[in-house]
Image: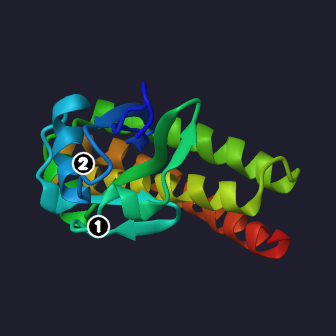
């Protein structure tokens, strides 16, 4: 290793729609070690068994080392980009504590993101690969919302609101299918 070069790896990760920078002490770290670092450095408290790390379009096994993933060197720094997703069981576990107000806010944000992506795809303002990457996050949010709107978690007086949100979610899902179809045509 040359003078001034570091063996650390900077991971730029999309976690629940927000960008987080996670530093791995060296490129021999395994994906499992990265998941532990994500919990510490991003301030999360998520059991590793629910985490799925998507790097370069593939879900990575816990035993894979960072060096095997094709690290890019930019300005003397080793960098990787990726996305952290969660197994379905985590969504249901997390959704049990969600309130209808939080769910409403997430649904509004989802509707906005889907509308923006729909426009980008229909006007060819993004590549099919970029659209697919965004769809992964959108599907993650849809799973969250479905779990949060589960009937067993809603009080009787809130059912009308919940039913209305389910109808809005159906419209979002229809638009997502239209995006997928348009994306298939352009790819």
**Chosen colour scheme:** rainbow
25 w.r.t. 151: above or below: above
Where does residue 51 sit, x and y in percent of width and height? 24, 57
Closer-to-camera residue (136/113):
136
Kindly identify which numbered label has been placed on residue 34. 2
Q: Neighbour class for label 2 at 10 Å: few (<14), some, many (≥20)? A: many
Q: Tell me which numbered mark, 2 or 1, is placed earlier along the sequence.
A: 2
115 w.r.t. 59: above or below: above
How many numbered callouts? 2
Residue occupying image coordinates x 56% and y 62%: 173
Q: Is 171 displayed left or right of 62 in the figure? A: right
Disc 1 element: loop
Q: CA distance from mark 2 to mark 1?
A: 10 Å
User: In terms of image quadrants, where is residue 127?
Assistant: bottom right
Residue occupying image coordinates x 30% and y 61%: 65
Closer-to-camera residue (46/142):
46
Where does residue 140 sit, x and y in percent of width and height? 40, 56
Q: Neighbour class for label 1 at 10 Å: few (<14), some, many (≥20)? A: some
Disc 2 element: helix
Q: Which residue is mark 1?
A: 64
63 w.r.t. 29: above or below: below
Closer-to-camera residue (113/42):
42
Where does residue 9 sit, x and y in percent of width and height? 37, 40
Classify the position of the N terminus by image quarter: top left
Residue occupying image coordinates x 16% and y 33%: 40
């Amino acid at each position: 290793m040359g003078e001034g070069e570091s063996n650390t790896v900077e991971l730029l990760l999309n976690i629940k729609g927000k960008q987080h920078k996670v530093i791995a002490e060296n490129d021999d770290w395994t994906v499992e070690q990265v998941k532990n670092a994500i919990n510490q450095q991003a301030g999360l408290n998520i059991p590793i068994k629910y985490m799925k790390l998507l790097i370069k379009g593939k879900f990575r096994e816990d035993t894979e080392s960072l060096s095997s993933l094709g690290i890019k060197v930019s300005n003397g720094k080793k960098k990787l980009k990726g996305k952290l997703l969660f197994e379905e069981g985590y969504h249901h576990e997390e959704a049990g504590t969600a309130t209808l107000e939080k769910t409403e806010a997430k649904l509004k944000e989802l509707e906005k993101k889907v509308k923006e992506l729909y426009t980008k795809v229909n006007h060819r303002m993004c590549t099919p690969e970029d659209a697919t990457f965004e769809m992964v996050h959108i599907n993650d949010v849809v799973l969250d919302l479905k779990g949060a709107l589960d009937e067993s978690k809603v009080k009787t007086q809130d059912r009308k609101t919940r039913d209305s949100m389910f109808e809005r979610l159906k419209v979002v899902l229809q638009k997502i299918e239209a995006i997928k179809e348009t994306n298939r045509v352009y790819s």
